[in-house]
Image: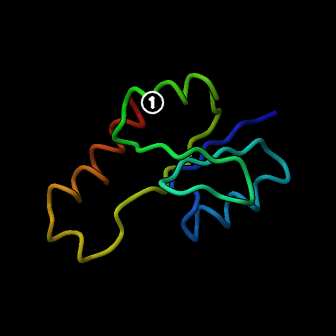
């Protein structure tokens, strides 16, 4: 069966997508919060060691990356915005 990893799974879009896909696929979510509707892991995407361990353990066929710092106000803190949007994405694909 196809395994799908969804980052940002406790957000509105991630949660809705996970609930929809779990009917046909094995879904695991990564987020800063847990989900009560499907299996999720609380992992910071900036923690490369823990993220790498999780991905090698789950071995997803598909990754849907929805985790991001989405608030416009967060762009004021450029370092935080960079870490949560750019570096976290780089960690996920490395």
Residue drawn at (21%, 57%), measured in percent from left and top? 80
Residue 39 lies left or right of residue 68; in this view the side is right
Regarding mark 1 in the picture, which secondary structure is present there? Answer: helix
**Quarter of the image containing the C terminus?**
top left
Residue drawn at (15%, 65%), measured in percent from left and top? 77
Q: Mark 1 Cα within 10 Å, few/some/many (few <14, many 20+)?
A: few
Dividing the picture into quarters, in which one does residue 90 lie? top left
Residue 88: x, y in percent? Answer: 34, 44
Q: How many marks?
A: 1
Residue drawn at (58%, 57%), measured in percent from left and top? 9
Residue 13: x, y in percent? Answer: 58, 67
Residue drawn at (58%, 49%), measured in percent from left and top? 6
Q: Residue furthest right?
A: 23
The residue to which callout 1 is attached is 50
Residue 65 lies left or right of residue 46; in this view the side is right
Residue 65 lies left or right of residue 45; in this view the side is right
Q: By what rule are the colours in the image chosen?
A: rainbow
Residue 22 lies left or right of residue 80; in this view the side is right
Q: Residue furthest bottom?
A: 73
Name the one closer to the observer, 10 or 17.
Answer: 10
Residue 74: x, y in percent? Answer: 24, 70
Residue 27: x, y in percent? Answer: 71, 45
**Quarter of the image containing the N terminus?**
top right
Q: Is residue 4 above or below residue 54?
A: below
Q: Is residue 51 above or below residue 67?
A: above
């Amino acid at each position: 069966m196809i395994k799908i990893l969804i980052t940002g799974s406790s957000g509105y879009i991630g949660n809705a997508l996970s609930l929809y896909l779990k009917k046909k696929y094995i879904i695991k979510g990564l987020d800063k919060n847990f989900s009560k509707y499907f299996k999720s892991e609380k992992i910071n995407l900036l923690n490369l060691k823990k993220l790498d361990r999780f991905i090698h353990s789950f071995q997803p066929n598909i990754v849907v990356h929805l985790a991001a710092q989405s608030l416009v106000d967060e762009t004021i803190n450029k370092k935080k915005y960079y870490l949560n949007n750019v570096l976290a994405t780089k960690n996920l694909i490395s």
